[in-house]
Image: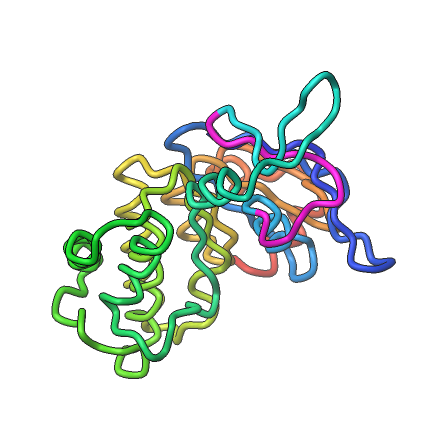
Amino acid sequence: MLRARDITKSFGPHLVLSGVSLDVKRGEVVCIIGPSGSGKSTFLRCLNFLEVPDAGGVWVDGERVACQEIDGVLWELPARVFARQRASIGMVFQRFNLFSNLTAEENVSLALRLVKRLPRSEARDIARAVLASVGLERFIHHRPSQLSGGQQQRVAIARAVAMEPKVLLFDEPTSALDPELVHEVLSVMTGLAGTGMTMVVVTHEIGFAREVSDRVVFMDGGGIVEQGVSGEVLANPSEPRTKAFLSKIK
């Protein structure tokens, strides 16, 4: 479902990603772990072109994102095609990124109206159904300031899910939450995994990675150091750097 090949990204003289490649199967949940500054979030942002890679390519469901190759030459895709591709790659951020002046329902329905061009009534009905699926049916008319951090993150997840993405990316979705609110967000994510949603999750929640993900990827220094079946990597990592990292956070 998702293929990244040789993704490279620098900011000025600082090389953040050095030829990172990853395949994610349809319905697979992959957790990316690693120390701060290892390139995890930048890699995730390159997957949906919030950051444009300096080199490499991304394919979703067999289609190359942002460009196509014709006779050995890469050509940039038209803006409308690129927008459609990006809509198929959902993203949930650390800091929710909700519109503070809109209600939960409006935050979810906005992209449905602007990107998918759905009628207002249809977008509203979808928003309400998806918000109900994450336990927020009583809060559809609340603005972000009236919601807890966990509730705001669930609105953000509902917004992403409502677009029916082929792949859903999570960038440390619980890192901005108080400890007692983490569980409610992880429960929603666990439920999504159970529906067969293809997910790539940058996280420090090792318990979630162990219990829910199919595969764990450990990144450090702008590259993938180790990856494999979650239980095996987390219980018995083969690389010394992975062992050192896990010994400090278990």
Q: Position of residue 237 (x, y in %)?
A: 60, 39
Toward the viewer: 210 or 89? 89
| Above or below for 191 versus 198 | below
Residue at horizontal 66%, vertical 31%? 5
Q: Position of residue 189 (x, y in %)?
A: 33, 51
Is residue 58 or residue 203 the one in the foreground?
Answer: 58
- Residue appearing at x 64%, y 38% in the figure: 226
State the image coordinates of residue 202 (x, y, percent, origin top left). Answer: 52, 52
Q: Quadrant of residue 38?
A: bottom right
Q: Is residue 180 above or below residue 119?
A: below
Task: Point out the residue furthest to the bottom here.
Answer: 145
In the rendered image, the residue lying farthest to the right is 13
Magenta region: 49-61
Please state the horizontal and vertical placement of residue 173, each as a whole percent of the image.
Answer: 44, 61
Give the camera-side residue of 193 and 117: 117
Indicate left or right for 53 with 90 as reference: right
Total numbered circles:
0
Task: Please tell me whether residue 58 belongs to the stretch shown in magenta.
Answer: yes
Residue 166 part of the magenta segment: no
User: In percent of the image, x 46 and y 48: which residue is there?
Assistant: 169
Describe the colour scheme in one phrase. rainbow
At x 32% / y 43%, what residue is drawn? Answer: 164
